[in-house]
Amino acid sequence: MSYADAAAKGPKQSPEDPRPPVGGVYHDESESTASLIDVDSPHVQTVESGFLKQDVQTTTQAERIEREAEEKEKQEDEEKKKAKAHKAKSSGICENTSNPVFLANAAIATVVGAGLGFGAYKQHARGNLSWELVGLSAGAVGIFGAVDYFVSKWFLQNKFPPK
């Protein structure tokens, strides 16, 4: 159904019915025209001839370069802190190679480890290695380690303090 057909089925308008006013051009002089764009101004801005050869051409570029420099500086500071912390953590072994307590503990750990390994192998070869024997050996190693820790700590604090 077309619009004309739908309008023809509706009520007829008598000539006496008022028609809605037909709109015209609305003029209001109270509005300011200051915000309008001046069409007489040049639309192309001129720049220096060496503009494209400049490192930084816009303020946005300058801000981005500044932000990147700040981020790089922060990252370098963090890396220095990490390196310093790593050096402090790992330098304990290198600095203590002349310490007799450190050397004695290394020698004792080597001898005890080799002795336990050889003893466990001999027990296994005889068929006598059991979980009970392994548990007793592990307990003995734990007790020995605790005693060695406290004795070494006392020696390091009293007899051979760190540099």
Image (tube, rainbow, N blue to C red):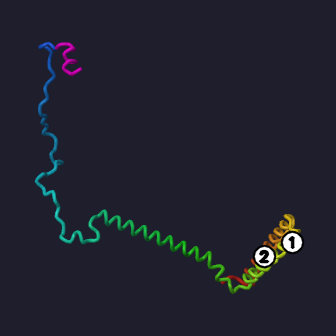
Q: Where does label 2 land, which residue?
A: 113
The span from disc 1 to disc 2 (Cα, nearest Å) is 15 Å
Q: Is residue 8 magenta?
A: yes
Residue 140 versus residue 60 in the image, above or below: below
Residue 111 versus residue 39 in the image, above or below: below
Near-viewer residue (32 or 14): 14
| Residue positioned 71% across, 85% down in the render | 99
Horizontal and vertical percent for residue 97?
Answer: 68, 84
Q: Is residue 75 magenta?
A: no
Task: Check disc 1 and report its element: helix, strand or loop.
Answer: helix
Q: In the rendered view of the protein, which quadrant contains the N terminus?
A: top left
Q: Amino acid at mark 1?
A: Gln
Q: Is residue 118 left or right of residue 98?
A: right
Q: Is residue 103 left or right of residue 95?
A: right
Quarter of the rendering containing residue 92: bottom right
Q: Where does label 1 land, which residue?
A: 123
* Nearer to us: label 1 or label 2: 1
Near-viewer residue (9 or 54): 9
Quarter of the rendering containing residue 16: top left
Residue 32 versus residue 101 in the image, above or below: above
| Residue positioned 82% across, 71% down in the render | 143
Horizontal and vertical percent for residue 35?
Answer: 18, 48
The numbered mark, 1 or 2, whose residue comes first in the sequence reads 2
**Residues shaded magenta:** 1-12
What crowding class fits label 2: few (fewer than 14 Cα within 10 Å), some (14-19), or many (20 or more)? few
| Residue positioned 17% across, 61% down in the render | 45
Horizontal and vertical percent for residue 103?
Answer: 73, 83
Q: In the rendered view of the protein, which quadrant contains the C terminus?
A: bottom right
Near-viewer residue (151 or 3): 3
Q: Amino acid at mark 2?
A: Gly
User: Given contact means CB atoms under 8 Å apart, are the residues at marks 1 and 2 in contact?
Assistant: no
Disc ID at residue 74: none
